[in-house]
Image (spheres, rainbow, N blue to C red):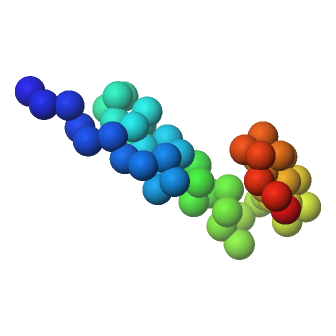
Amino acid sequence: MSEPARPSLREEPFGYTVTLVPGAKEVVTGIRAAFWDPQGTVSERTKELVFLRTSAVNGCET
């Protein structure tokens, strides 16, 4: 049994982690789709705050 190839962190932040738990990739994809859906229940203000917070945590210049 071979280990799955570890993807680049730039490609997928949770890429390697979700390969460790069966079904985790589908759950993460579903959460991402539900959160960023323009017709969803998450307000644009909340999306902006999440984006800014993750940018700060990741050391991005925004």
* Residue plotted at (8% across, 27% down): 1
Using the image as rendered, state which of residue 12 and residue 21 is in the foreground.
Answer: 12
Measured as percent of width and height from the top left, residue 51 is found at 79, 55
27 left or right of 7 in image = right
Residue placed furthest toward the left = 1
31 left or right of 9 in image = right
In which image quadrant can residue 46 be found? bottom right
Measured as percent of width and height from the top left, residue 22 is found at 32, 32
* Residue plotted at (66% across, 67% down): 37
Measured as percent of width and height from the top left, residue 54 is found at 76, 47
The image shows residue 13, relative to residue 17, as above or below, that is below
Residue 40 visible within the image: yes
Measured as percent of width and height from the top left, residue 60 is found at 77, 53
51 left or right of 23 in image = right
Residue 23 visible within the image: no
* Count of numbered labels shown in the rendering: 0
Using the image as rendered, state which of residue 62 and residue 32 is in the foreground.
Answer: 62
Using the image as rendered, state which of residue 56 and residue 26 is in the foreground.
Answer: 56
| The C terminus: image quadrant | bottom right
In which image quadrant can residue 35 be found? bottom right
* Residue plotted at (37% across, 47% down): 7
20 left or right of 49 in image = left
* Residue plotted at (67% across, 63% down): 36
Residue placed furthest toward the bottom = 38
